[in-house]
Image (cartoon, coloured by chain):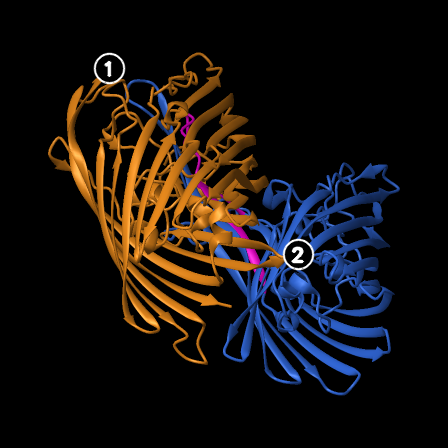
């Protein structure tokens, strides 16, 4: 959501037409084909949230996250053709994914906070079959959890709990293409399939003596990235490159945050159990603008300045009922600086970037049936900021 | 028809910690990954110049001559018995892959590697262990886990290679709440009309452990290695609370229910390996001595306690489940072990650009399980592992193919020595015998690039 490294972070998600090193494994695998030698990179990223509700004096709890970045690009030669493998991982300190899904009336920003708390794990390959055309493909990976919890009373009076769970891989393909359509013009098209990490744990019947509870189905979506189609055009003007992009995100496929707690059995399909809470989203279009300026500091050192802007419309509807599952349209601004050293110096390169996301204030009026104890009653405005920074250091092998 | 009673449930909270780990002791998991290494009995800490190095000795990455991409498959089938009856230990299928990148920085050889191993198609599969029945605790019901290792190595001097990295394991941790109104069963499914909702606060977390290695090659045909892998332990914890009431006509019965469960579902002992490799013409002779700190192995038996509190009005005859407390963890008193491993590889030049590789290996792994146990009925025995393998190495087979292609295969047979074990207490037999064997086979395809 914020870019997988300092270069895409600075460009506010743009950069599909640029050789962005290991970040191309996510941004556009076709651009991996530009890597001529192995490159290994390590980094660190941090994100802080400041999400508020007004006039209620509430701040939505969001801890923010700190992530380690790891990536490499590795060209492997098949005759005269090079296949370049790229690996990118952005991993929160000790987490792969997080499912913080409180009850619907509790104020929350699940599309904003939760998506920054998941590991982004991408393995891609890029090649250049024709001089002007590069193609790439890859996989994004996460995990889904399924299992059962059973509590049994033993004949001797003791109790035993049995837990059986399985983490299954969830993979989403990424495809990219870059074409040099003129001496100064490049086009790129990137497709990312939806990445959805579910969890479903069935808690078997709990015996309370007087009764036995029905099986509890604890299920929901821990992480969701929508199907995305992104097109970008780059124009080179000497040392300056201008980038214009447009992203389509199919949020309408979002299945909802939480599942139904009690599921109707086959023998009673029309049972009156509470349905799963609804959270219906709509598709969105997000324009991107970015500029990259390369400067030769010395004959052996180059610097790159990057800046980007992204307008991200919210796919979520107004929260007019008891639900306070908020989301806001965002203006995203990125700024970054990078330095690369060449031979005979140590072939290091380092990039630093910061990004500011401003949540456009959104006012939501509750319906008349909403109880006054609801945190959003009678009207609530949401706004805030998300601040992110990333730093990476890489070394290029010979 | 029974009277309709509507208990109100307010908070059922279940917190769950599920850490996949590496507490495996199958022949394959202790001897490593990749057909070449398995065929050499796992004796490759001083001779692993390929993508398997993250498992054996990270410094081996930089001993590779080229970058490499490899993919392996292996299957293990068990024929283990307890008291003469089959133990029913399920088979294990492992798919693993590695990527090795090599180059130089300021003239110093540098390499990095990424290795991934996936068992039975899962990132992880874990289940709790009970104490009541005899169980091959290190082979049966293994946590099937993803293992992901990333390592870096450099060779600052021609005779010295250093490497290190981190292994990753996936795990889940968290809890969930349930609230609402549950309806009592009326025999016709009325409980499914319960008006219940849940919320979740769970994390899929990563567990990390370090790996370090050094290889010293004082002479052209000698290499010595020392490698270390850290301990990893995966705990599981479940807590739950329920507070509500059951109403039946004019009666209202407050109910409080608490659940607590803990267990260790996976454990990887700290390991130190000293290895040597000697090359004589086309033959490699390898020997490893590994030390594993199994004495820190915690009991994998799940422990749980429940407490149900209800204030019964006079005249209402209900039998409530008995309350139990969470017992203290027990120490299974496992022992540290030292395991020797031997391997030999001979290359038969076939053509100018190809060679046939023949391999054999042996390893002895003493059981860390004590002969006498208290209440538990764990099963494990000493193990002799014999392995053979072959490989076909092709150099520059075609302009359109990688610079080198190697296809390796291995077969492995492990004999579990017959053993009699005793257990004091518990409901099951206090003395039982164990024996058996396991078969494993697999193949690795490696592609090398300049």
Q: Is residue B396 above or below residue A337?
A: below
- Residue A90 relative to residue B35: left or right: right
The 10 Å Cα crowd at callout 1, few under 14, some 14 to 19, many 20 or more, is some
Residue at x 34%, y 51% (from the top left corner): B279
Q: Residue furthest front?
A: B219
Write the start and end of the magenta stretch as one range: A194-219
The 10 Å Cα crowd at callout 2, few under 14, some 14 to 19, many 20 or more, is few
Write down the quadrant of residue A315 in the picture: bottom right
Count of marks overlaid on the render: 2
User: Which quadrant, please, contains the C terminus of chain A?
Assistant: bottom right
Residue B56 in percent (x, y) is at 42, 44
Q: Secondary structure at mark 2?
A: loop
User: Which residue is identified by label 1?
Assistant: B425
- Between the C-alphas of marks 2 and 1, the distance is 66 Å
Which is more foreground, mark 2 or mark 1? Answer: 2
What is chain B's hue in the picture? orange
Question: Are the residues under badges 2 and 1 in a single subunit?
Answer: yes
Q: Residue furthest bottom?
A: A182
What is chain A's hue in the picture? blue
Residue A221 in percent (x, y) is at 57, 51
Assess whether residue A215 is covered by the magenta stretch. yes
Residue A233 in percent (x, y) is at 77, 78
């Amino acid at each position: 959501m914020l870019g997988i490294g300092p270069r895409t972070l600075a460009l506010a998600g743009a950069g599909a037409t640029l050789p962005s090193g290991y970040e191309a494994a996510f941004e556009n695998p076709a651009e991996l084909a530009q890597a001529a030698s192995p490159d290994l990179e390590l980094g660190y990223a941090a994100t802080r949230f400041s999400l508020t509700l007004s006039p209620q004096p509430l701040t939505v709890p969001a801890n923010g996250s700190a992530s380690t970045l790891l990536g490499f690009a590795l060209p492997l030669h098949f005759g005269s053709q090079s296949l370049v493998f790229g690996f990118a991982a952005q991993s929160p300190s000790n987490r792969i994914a997080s499912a913080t899904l409180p009850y619907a009336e509790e104020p929350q920003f699940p599309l904003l906070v939760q998506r920054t708390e998941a590991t982004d794990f991408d393995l891609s390959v890029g090649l250049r079959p024709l001089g002007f055309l590069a193609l790439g493909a890859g996989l994004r990976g996460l995990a889904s959890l399924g299992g059962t919890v059973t509590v049994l009373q033993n004949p001797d009076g003791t109790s035993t709990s049995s837990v059986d769970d399985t983490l299954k891989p969830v993979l989403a393909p990424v495809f990219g293409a870059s074409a040099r359509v003129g001496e100064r013009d490049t086009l790129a098209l990137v497709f990312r399939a939806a990445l959805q990490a579910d969890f479903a744990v069935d808690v078997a019947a709990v015996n309370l003596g007087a009764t036995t509870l029905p099986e509890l189905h604890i299920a929901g979506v821990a992480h969701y990235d929508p199907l995305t189609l992104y097109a970008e055009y780059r124009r080179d003007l000497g040392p300056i490159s201008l980038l214009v992009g447009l992203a389509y995100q199919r949020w309408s496929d979002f299945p909802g945050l939480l599942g139904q707690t009690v599921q109707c059995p086959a023998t009673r399909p029309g049972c009156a159990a509470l349905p799963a809470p609804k959270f219906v989203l709509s598709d969105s279009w997000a324009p991107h603008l970015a500029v990259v300026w390369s400067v030769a500091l010395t004959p052996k050192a180059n610097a790159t300045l990057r800046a980007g802007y992204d307008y991200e419309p919210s796919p979520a509807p107004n929260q007019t009922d008891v639900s306070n599952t908020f989301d806001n349209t965002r203006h995203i601004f990125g700024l970054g600086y990078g330095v690369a050293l060449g031979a005979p110096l140590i072939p290091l390169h380092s990039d630093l970037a910061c990004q500011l996301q401003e949540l456009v204030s959104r006012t939501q009026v509750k319906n008349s049936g909403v109880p006054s104890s609801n945190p959003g009653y009678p009207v609530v405005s949401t706004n805030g900021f998300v601040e992110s920074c990333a730093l990476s250091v890489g070394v290029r092998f010979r | 028809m029974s009277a309709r009673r509507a208990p109100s449930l307010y908070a059922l909270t279940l917190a769950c910690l599920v850490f996949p780990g590496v507490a495996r002791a199958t022949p394959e998991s202790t001897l490593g990954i990749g057909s070449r290494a398995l065929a050499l009995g796992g004796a490759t800490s001083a001779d692993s110049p390929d993508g398997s190095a993250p498992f054996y000795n990270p410094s081996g990455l930089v001993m590779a001559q080229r970058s490499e991409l490899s993919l392996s498959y292996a299957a293990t089938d068990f024929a283990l018995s307890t008291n003469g009856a089959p133990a029913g230990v399920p088979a294990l299928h492992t798919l693993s892959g590695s990527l090795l990148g090599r180059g130089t920085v300021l003239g110093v050889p540098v390499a990095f590697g990424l290795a991934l191993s996936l068992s039975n198609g899962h990132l992880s599969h874990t289940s709790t262990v009970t104490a009541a029945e005899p169980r091959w605790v290190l082979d049966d019901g293994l946590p099937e886990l993803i293992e992901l290792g990333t390592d870096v190595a450099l060779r600052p001097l021609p005779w010295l290679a250093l490497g290190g990295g981190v292994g990753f394991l996936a795990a889940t941790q968290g809890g969930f709440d349930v609230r609402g109104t549950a309806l009592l069963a009326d025999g016709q499914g009325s409980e499914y009309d319960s008006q219940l909702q849940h919320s979740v606060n769970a994390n899929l977390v990563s567990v990390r452990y370090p790996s370090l290695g050094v290889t010293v090659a004082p002479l052209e045909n000698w290499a010595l290695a020392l490698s270390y892998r850290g301990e990893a332990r995966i705990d599981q914890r479940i807590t739950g609370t329920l507070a509500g009431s059951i109403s039946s006509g004019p009666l209202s019965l407050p109910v409080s229910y608490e659940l607590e469960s803990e267990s260790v579902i996976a454990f990887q002992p700290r390991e130190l390996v000293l290895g040597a490799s000697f090359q004589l013409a086309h033959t490699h002779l390898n020997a490893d001595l590994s030390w594993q700190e199994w004495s820190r192995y915690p009991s994998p038996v799940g422990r749980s306690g429940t407490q149900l509190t209800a204030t019964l009005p006079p005249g209402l005859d209900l039998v409530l489940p008995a309350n139990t407390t969470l017992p203290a963890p027990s120490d299974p008193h496992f022992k540290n072990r030292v395991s020797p491993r031997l391997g030999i590889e001979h290359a038969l030049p076939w053509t100018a650009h190809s060679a046939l590789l023949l391999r054999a290996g042996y390893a002895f792994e003493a059981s860390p399980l004590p002969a006498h146990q208290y209440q538990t009925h764990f099963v494990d025995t000493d193990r002799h592992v014999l392995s053979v393998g072959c490989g076909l190495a092709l150099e520059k087979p075609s302009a359109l193919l990688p610079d080198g292609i190697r296809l390796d295969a291995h077969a492995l047979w492990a004999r579990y020595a017959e053993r009699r074990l005793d257990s004091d207490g518990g409901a099951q037999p206090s003395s039982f015998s164990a024996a058996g064997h396991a078969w494993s086979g697999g193949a690795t395809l490696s592609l090398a690039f300049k």
